[in-house]
Amino acid sequence: MSTVRPPGRQLPFTVRIIGDGPAALATAIGLLQGGVAVRCRPPRRPATASALPPRADSLSPGGHALLARLGVAEAFAADGHLPCHAHACDWGPGGLRHLDFISHPQGSAWQVDRGRFDGRLRERALALGLQWEPPDNTEAAPPVQAIVDASGRSSHFARRQGARRLRGDRQLAWLASAPAAHAPGDGMSLVEATADGWWYSAPAPGGRWSLACFTDADLRPSPAQGHAGWLQRLAAAPRTLDRLIAHGVDARHLALQPARLLAADSSRLDRFCGSGWLAVGDAAMGFDPLSAHGLTVALQSGLHAAQALIALRDGDAQALPAYAARLADAFDAYQRQRLALYRDETRHACHRYWQRRRHGGYDGTTSSSN
Ligand SMILES: Cc1cc2nc3c(=O)[nH]c(=O)nc-3n(C[C@H](O)[C@H](O)[C@H](O)COP(=O)(O)OP(=O)(O)OC[C@H]3O[C@@H](n4cnc5c(N)ncnc54)[C@H](O)[C@@H]3O)c2cc1C
């Protein structure tokens, strides 16, 4: 599969990308901009996917420059994503704190409508010549010179190559969305620490609110309680609850809406590349959503992966190991930040969720959820 060519000879070089999220599409755009042919293989989607709530993620200010490099900055600005001017945090002994993006050199953060955001990247990649393959197409697939695993936290391809997913915790997210009666005036997201984890809330595009509860798999409400169990937990997050009520978000409405339960652990592959393949975005390393860096890491690692594959095509046998070393450094830096953040919250230090995060160990178990 892997072929290293003498410099100067441009033999056909095609890359297959497994996945269709932001990391896959950023890699595809980077490769297509460098003259490399790309075939993208999406997942087989269950028929129930459309019933899930719309997803809004926060894009940190550093995302602007990446969108410009991908050629979608103008389209992004016209897409109705919500600017997020400040981030409030009830975390640690000092109580409520504000991080104001007005003084940030790269401007405000954004609450992005993930459907529209991913759609813009897809549109750009298609305009550059991206080809889609049918899902699960194995036997009939034409040969390629390299493969990119962009399958999110499932690391679908890398694990089939023998790589293992190392996990620092077993965090899950309960994710819901509801319409608000009053327009959000403050353009602000809020994180609130509680005994069993933390809550995130923010206005989302389309007059909705996005709400998420993060806790460990063994600390979540019992499945028999359904949504009601999660909404009971909301009482332990008074700032979040008060803010939702103030904006006219009806908790009964939340209880009736479909919600998602997603893996939100800190984890990484034990190796980020092999012969003729590499992993990008969440498939390589999953950051705690507390960092709000998942999207920028997906876009950045996609662009770096594209550079590495173009260098491989041009005969640089060290390009993939150098890419992997860069990811390892980024994960180490993230891990130090994560430790400091969780150690900062001392008010709930006697509870299991917080005790587990005071140490930085990673086990060798394999994550199966995405
Ligand atoms: C609850 C929650 C909240 C978050 N909030 C934020 C936030 O506010 N800000 C932020 O920056 N980040 C946030 N993140 C992280 C962010 O969503 C991810 O880091 C980002 O989506 C990673 O992009 P990706 O392309 O690597 O993976 P994904 O977005 O997961 O895309 C992977 C794609 O591959 C597909 N796939 C899976 N298996 C296969 C297969 N076998 N074959 C083909 N395709 C496959 C999946 O269906 C999916 O479409 C959050 C994450 C969670 C869980």
Image (cartoon, helix red, strand yellow):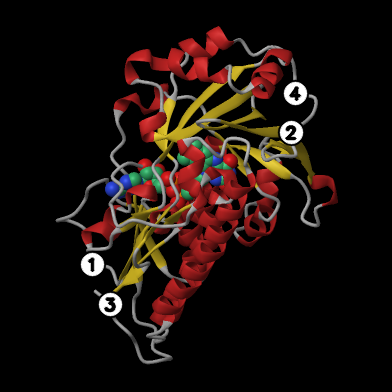
Lower position in the chain sequence, tag 1 or tag 2:
1
Which of label 2 and label 3 is nearer to you? Answer: 2
At x 71%, y 51%, the residue is: 61
Q: Which residue is mark 1?
A: 143
Question: Left of 355 or right of it: where is 162?
Answer: left
The answer to whether the residues at label 2 and label 3 have Cβ atoms under 8 Å apart is: no
370 or 328: which is nearer to us? 328
- Point out the tag, 3 or 1, that comes first from the N-terminus: 3
Q: CA separation, marks 1 and 2?
A: 48 Å
* Furthest residue in direction front, as rendered: 350
Location of residue 123 in the rendering, given as x and y in whole percent from the top left corner: 52, 47
Query: How busy is the neighbourhood of tag 3: few (under 14 within 10 Å), some, or many (20 plus)?
Result: some
Q: Which residue is mark 2?
A: 188
Q: Which mark is residue 2?
A: 3
Disc 4 secondary structure class: loop
Of label 4 and label 1, which has the lower sequence position? Answer: 1
Q: Quadrant of residue 157?
A: bottom left
Q: Quadrant of the C terminus?
A: top left
- Closer mark to the observer between disc 3 and disc 4: 4
Q: Looking at the image, which residue sits at the far top?
A: 252
Q: Which mark is in front, 4 or 2? A: 2
Assign a secondary structure to mark 1: loop
Disc 3 to disc 4, C-alpha distance: 52 Å
Mark 1 surroundings within 10 Å by alpha-carbon count, few (fewer than 14), some (14 through 19), many (20 or more): few
